[in-house]
Amino acid sequence: HYGRGPSRTGRASARPSHKSFRIKRVLAKKQKQNRPVPYGIRQRTDNTIRYNSKRRHGRRTKLGW
């Protein structure tokens, strides 16, 4: 059994995930975009912006690649 759960070495998995740096950068940007509207912006706009309409759920909507 490979890489699921803690191993004898103490790390989470023995094999690294195969992500290029370019993909990792895109994933980091999507992760930063996927957050609610900050409270201060809701106050500044008199609650006209109530929620982030571009919010993405990780299981429902995939990134398309």
Image (cartoon, rainbow, N blue to C red):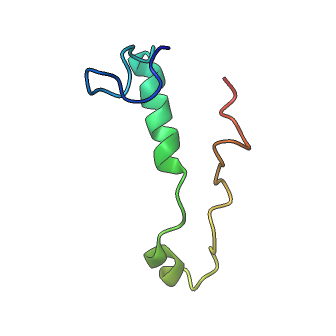
Q: Residue at x 70, y 28 (%)?
A: 64
Could you tell me residue 37's position as x and y percent?
53, 67
The quadrant of the image that shows the C terminus is top right
Q: Position of residue 22 (x, y in %)?
A: 43, 20
Could you say where residue 43 lies in the image, as x and y percent from the top left? 49, 83
Give the left or right position of residue 61, taking residue 16 as reference.
Answer: right
Q: Looking at this view, is 58 or 5 the one in front?
A: 5
Q: Extreme right residue here?
A: 60
Question: On the image, which quarter does residue 46 sit in?
Answer: bottom right
Q: Is residue 41 above or below residue 29?
A: below
Decide: is 43 above or below 5: below
Which residue lies most toward the left here? 9
Residue at image location 43% in from the left, 15% down from the top: 20
Determine whether, in the image, residue 54 is placed left or right of residue 23. Answer: right
Closer to the camera, 51 or 15? 15
Query: Residue at position x 43%, y 26% from top?
Result: 24
User: Is 48 rendered above or below residue 36?
Assistant: below
Q: Nearer the viewer, residue 46 or 60?
A: 60
Q: Is residue 24 left or right of residue 8?
A: right
Image height of 46 relative to 2, above or below: below
In front of the other: 45 or 33: 33
**Number of numbered labels in the structure image:** 0
Would residue 3 be found to the left or right of residue 30 on screen? left
